[in-house]
Every structure is written in structure tokens, then in C-alpha cells.
Image: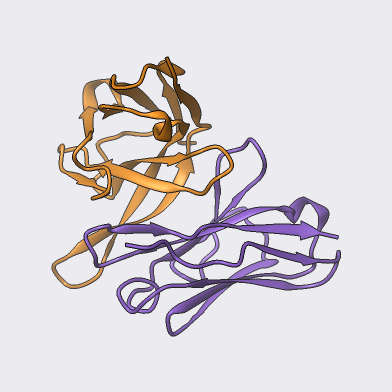
Chain colours: A purple, B orange
Amino acid sequence: QSALTQPASVSGSPGQSIAISCTGTSSDVGGYSYVSWYQQHPGKAPKLMIYDVTDRPSGVSNRFSGSKSGNTASLTISGLQAEDEADYYCSSYTSSSTLVLFGGGTKLTVL
Amino acid sequence: QLQLQESGPGLVKPSETLSLTCTVSGGSISSRSHFWGWIRQPPGKGLEWIGSIYYSGSTNYNPSLKSRVTISVETSKNQFSLRLSSVTAADTAVYYCARQQLKPVSMREVVITEFDPWGQGTLVTVSS
């Protein structure tokens, strides 16, 4: 099954808000509330930022928020900071035999 | 605080078998609420789920790799392992292990969901 679709890159200035989309199908993103988002800095392991579409793990800044509409989930980062510059990946459970899907990743540049 | 650490050879020859172990510390691998997974990331590319295992030995594999993958668990050592056979250069990647949550999708069915935490990852290069 194809990966979830994310934009290759997004950018924003410090203090601004940006959103990263993650589009799937009714068999994954649209059908279940199990979308998660990961932040990955160069040379580092991914870090869970959002799970169950909207929930934040303890310790993650409330500048990070998640939402979903239909088959598209979104990660919004408000009050952009330089340290937010990283790659972001979405993931979803899928009812297909693949079970776990990742998006292709989005590179966030803070201008 | 739960921590995971991957270990194994950093260089594997083509056609041979890649073997990695993930050691879990700060918690028990015998948790009933979690699976334990392997994910890989080729250089400069995105993440790919390889497969996951429950403490009982029950496994789920990515269909695209299933014919070459074996994941096993050793609860006495708090470890789980990955074996990937017949490797080629396309299998060169950073390999991560991570804990996965189990959550319900119905009254009778649970599924594997987010990965947290992750190990630091280990680069495995396939080359002669």
C-alpha cells in the first residue's frame, strides 16, 4: 500500500504558524483515530509529538497540535521557533495487511 | 524511564542475513499493553515499518518484507531481535527499535499504533 501523502517541504518565519498535511484513505487516516506525528532532527531518532490525532505526550510543547478532517490529518505548529526546524512524519494504523503506514516526510524550514 | 538500544554488526555482505538486537531497559518487555517494533530509514529517505512482536511471540510483518523477516523475543533478557535475510544494497539503512501501543478498534480487536520511545538507531550498510 502507498505511503501517506505529505508535502515535501514547508517553511515559516519565527513566531508564525504552519500546518503540515497528511493525506490517506478511509482505510487508514479517515477510518481511525490513530494518527501520530514524529519530529526528527538530523542524525537523531524520531520523537513522538502527537498521537491519537490530537493528543500530546507529556513534555511536548502545546505549540504542537493535531487535527483531522476526512482522510487528511494535519500537524500545526504555532509560534515557530528555530529549534522546530526538522523533518516531520505522520503515521497511521491501516486496516490493510500493511497495518502501519508512514508519510514520506516533510522538511520544515524556519526562515 | 524506558530506554531501547539497538546492537549488531554495522556491515553485512550482500545475500547474507542482517541480525540486530534491541535491549529494553527501565521497563518490562512482557507488558500486555505493548508491541515492540522495528523501523528502518534508508539514507536521506523516509521511515518504513518492518514488523513488530508481542511478548508472547505473536508477530506482525510488513507484507513487502515478510518473506525475508523474522522477529523474535527473549523475555528473560528483555530483548527482541530482527533477522533480515538475503540482503542487498537496498537494505542499507538506519534501523530503529521502538515500543508500540496496543489500542482498541472494536470491542474485540486491538491494533498497534504509535511508536514511543525509540532507540537511537544503528546504521547497517550492505556491501561486499
Residue B60 left/right relative to A93: left
Classify the position of the C terminus of chain A by image quarter: bottom right
Give the residue drawn at x 77%, y 51%.
Answer: A83
Residue B115 left/right relative to A61: left
Residue A34, picture quadrant: bottom left
Classify the position of the N terminus of chain A by image quarter: bottom left
Q: Is residue A88 above or below residue B54?
A: below
Residue A15 left/right relative to B103: right
Frontmost residue, B99 versus A84: A84
Q: Residue furthest bottom?
A: A70
Residue B43 image position (x, y, % from top left): 55, 37
Frontmost residue, A72 versus B104: A72
Give the residue drawn at x 37%, y 27%.
Answer: B22
Residue A7 image position (x, y, % from top left): 60, 67
Residue A51 visible in image: no
Q: Is residue A85 above or below residue B42?
A: below
Give the residue drawn at x 28%, y 58%.
Answer: A99
Residue B50 image position (x, y, % from top left): 33, 43
Number of disc labels: 0
Residue A58 image position (x, y, % from top left): 56, 55
Residue B37, picture quadrant: top left
Q: Is residue B53 above or below residue A29?
A: above
Residue A43, picture quadrant: top right
Give the residue drawn at x 38%, y 73%.
Answer: A33
Residue B93 visible in image: yes
